[in-house]
Amino acid sequence: MGKDILDEMTKQELILWVRRHVVQRPSKSDVLLSRWETLVQKQQQLMEADHTVLQKPDWEKIRASTKAYEALNSRINKLYKQYEAASKLEARRCCEHAGCDKQAVVDGLCQTHEDWWQQQGQHQA
């Protein structure tokens, strides 16, 4: 009997034919072993497919993504340099105009705060 005949048989016809022509009934372990072998075969096929994908990288996609990354990185670097230059310029302007007065106020507040903490420490001791 060829494979094409088995394909033409319905499930019920196939079961009936097996029961008539097979001398020994399969045991539960035979069925479980058959299922296990089927699962192992499917898993091996999946692993081979994954392995094939890993062995053959798509160099065009890699080149395209690398070029896109380099372009983005270049654009970010340009923007960062512009930001850095502008922030340095702004910092210089602030220090020149009112930086001395503001720094004196901040220094005074820090000194007042430190004096208060020292007084609190002396009273508790």
Image: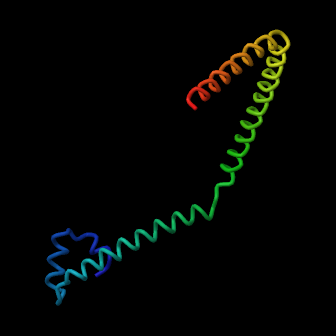
Q: x, y percentage for residue 77?
A: 77, 33
> Which residue is nearer to you in this view: 10 or 61?
61
Measuring 30% from the left and 78% from the top, which residue is drawn there? 34
| Left or right for 69, reference 120 | right
Q: Is residue 11 above or below residue 73?
A: below
> Which residue is nearer to you in this view: 83 or 25?
83
Number of numbered labels in the structure image: 0
Measuring 20% from the left and 74% from the top, which residue is drawn there? 14
Q: Is residue 100 above or below residue 35?
A: above
Q: x, y percentage for residue 113?
A: 65, 21
Residue 8 occupies quadrant:
bottom left
Residue 17 occupies quadrant:
bottom left
| Left or right for 86, reference 117 | right
Task: Give the quarter of the figure containing the C terminus.
Answer: top right
Q: x, y percentage for residue 7?
A: 28, 70
Task: Give the quarter of the figure containing the N terminus.
Answer: bottom left
Residue 29 occupies quadrant:
bottom left
| Left or right for 110, reference 96 | left
> Which residue is nearer to you in this view: 96 or 82?
96
